[in-house]
Each structure stands twice: as C-alpha cells, then as structure tokens.
Image (cartoon, rainbow, N blue to C red):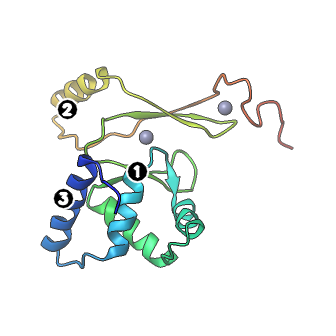
Amino acid sequence: MTMKNPQLIKIIAQFSIYLEENNLRKTTERIMILEEIYSRNDHFDAEELYMDFQNRNQLISRATIYNTLDLLSDSGFIRRNQFGTNKTRYEKASNFRQHDHLICLDCNKISEFCDPRLQQIQQTVSSIMEFEIQSHDLLLFGKCRKENCENKKIKQN
Ligand SMILES: [Zn+2]
Ligand SMILES: [Zn+2]
C-alpha cells in the first residue's frame, strides 16, 4: 500500500460522502479512477485514461471509465472542456486553483494561466448585469512560440 498524499485522502473522503448521499455504490473502480485523475496534471480524454489503465494491466471497462467521468463531472470533482474541438477533455477540479487555458492551433498544446483580474471582471459584470455567475470558461486560441511546435509550417490542403 503506497502512502497517499493528504489532498488525495481528502478528495476520496469527499467523493465517498457524495456517493453515499446520492445512493451510489462506492466501487473500487470509481475510487481508482478518481485517484488516477488526481495524480495527473494534464488535460486528458476518456480514451487516454482508458489506455493508461490498460497499459498497467488494471482492467477497467470503457463503460466504467465513461460513466465515472460523467459522474465526476456532474459532481464537480473534475472539470470538462472541449477546448474548441469536438473531443471532451478532463482535468481535476476540487482544491485546484482557478485557471484558464491557451490552446495552440498548430500543436494543440494546452497551457494554463491564472490571472486574478478575471475574478474582478466577473464581479463587476455580475453586479452590472444582475446575474449570478457560477462558472466561466475562457479559451485563448493562437500559436505557441515553441521552436519544435508540431505542424507549424505544414499547410493543409
Ligand atoms: Zn504549438
Ligand atoms: Zn487546465
């Protein structure tokens, strides 16, 4: 048994409470998926997550992966984003600093930034528009300045 960090223990506890309150079963698979997501820092899709379990011989069915991802996003434990494509990507959400994303249109790299001024804009807009904002989704599209940015000079026919 490996040592789990305190943040992970807390998240598992919160998720367990959520499952219990909603009369959902606390299965090993659900907890394994939550742990995996909270041990990574990327923006992954369901298929990548499925393959990572496969590659470690931890056999979790595709259906379980998809269902659990839905469950985790509906309950707010993970954040879901399309990043301007039709592919849904996920990342951990709880206890995680608020951030927004930059997406390179050439290499598809997703970077994160955090600017507290967005919070102020939100508050101002909220009071002017008399609108209670629950979340926001800001995606900045462009071109990264990486030397080795893939597809940079390739023109599509
Ligand atoms: Zn790039
Ligand atoms: Zn992110």
Indicate whether 115 appears above or below 152.
above
Cα distance in 3D space between marks 3 and 1: 16 Å
User: Residue placed farthest to the front in the image?
Assistant: 1
* Residue named by callout 2: 126
Please tell me in which quarter of the rendered image ligand 2 is found.
top left
* Residue named by callout 1: 39
- Check disc 2 and give the amino acid type: Ser
Residue drawn at point x = 63 percent, y = 26 percent? 144
Cα distance in 3D space between marks 2 and 3: 30 Å
Task: Tell us which disc is closer to us: 2 or 3.
Answer: 3
* Residue named by callout 3: 14
Q: Position of residue 114 (x, y in %)?
A: 37, 27
- Asked whether 6 or 113 is in front, the reply is 6
Q: In what element is the residue under mark 2? A: helix
Relative to 5, is 147 on the left or the right? right
Quadrant in which the N terminus appears: bottom left
Task: Pick whichever of labels 2 and 3 is earlier in the sequence.
Answer: 3
- Asked whether 109 or 124 is in front, the reply is 109
Q: Position of residue 20 (x, y in %)?
A: 15, 73
Residue drawn at point x = 74 percent, y = 29 percent? 148
Q: In what element is the residue under mark 3? A: helix
Residue drawn at point x = 23 percent, y = 55 percent? 9
- Check disc 3 and give the amino acid type: Gln
